Image (cartoon, rainbow, N blue to C red):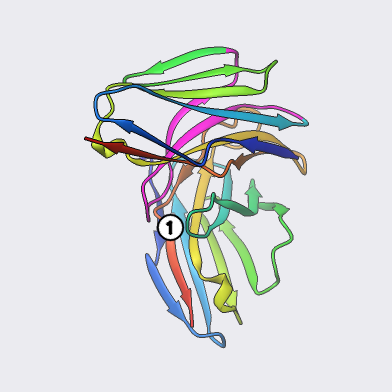
Amino acid sequence: DTEVTQTPKHLVMGMTNKKSLKCEQHMGHRAMYWYKQKAKKPPELMFVYSYEKLSINESVPSRFSPECPNSSLLNLHLHALQPEDSALYLCASSQGGPSNTEAFFGQGTRLTVV
Amino acid sequence: GQNIDQPTEMTATEGAIVQINCTYQTSGFNGLFWYQQHAGEAPTFLSYNVLDGLEEKGRFSSFLSRSKGYSYLLLKELQMKDSASYLCAVRGPSGGSYIPTFGRGTSLIVHP
């Protein structure tokens, strides 16, 4: 199983809503990532969890709140988003640690904030 | 941090060979990746180089020169389905971890 599964695939939310994006992998990977990608731009790193601990937060606004309940799951909680936050949100995972190899990506959640 | 440069767009003919270049500057280097991304889809892994030289995988090959901060992705026998964005990603140190940072991507258009 080399899949990273993200739900939902599409999400439309208002600026006062609270929603969560979910990501799951069963490859035994210990590093998990959230990336944000706008149209015709490369993925931009938001957060990295390494061994279930937040190791990198790339100055992301507090309206995005990550959570790693266990080694297989990664959530991104959304609250009071702005229209400019509309983007493709990609989850990825990799082995982590000294033998870190390539990152596998999920299919993404297409988020639209209205 | 990392600075990664690749051409914005390239065009090629079906059946031909195309080479997509990537140059990078990084304070620490721990591998270079190439990903393919079709519009609206997730990036898919193509190749990984950490030592100098050429890695071949079917129609795709990737080359790395660490001393020159240079890599290329070579696509042979181009097919229409190869039209996509090709992302070069360099893994370097960040906050005690090694994290891949993506270049802006090269949009490849394959025409008949």
Against A13, residue B111 (above or below) is above
Q: Chain of mark 1?
A: A
Which residue lies at the image location 65% right of the left edge and 74% below the top edge? A63
Mark 1 Cα-neighbour bin, 10 Å: few <14, some 14–19, many ≥20: many
Q: Position of residue B82 (x, y in %)?
A: 31, 36
Q: Position of residue B92 (x, y in %)?
A: 69, 34
Q: Position of residue B67 (x, y in %)?
A: 70, 15
Q: Is residue B27 left or right of residue A80?
A: right
Which residue lies at the image location 21% right of the left edge and 35% below the top edge? B112
**What kind of residue is marked 1?**
Gly
Against A78, residue B15 (above or below) is above
**Viewer-proximal residue among A12 and B82:** B82
Which residue lies at the image location 75% right of the left edge and 29% below the top edge? B28
Q: Position of residue A79 (x, y in %)?
A: 60, 79
Q: Residue furthest bottom?
A: A16
Residue B45 magenta: yes
Residue A6 magenta: no
Against A100, residue A14 (above or below) is below
Against A73, residue A82 (above or below) is below
Q: Which residues are magenta?
A: B28-52
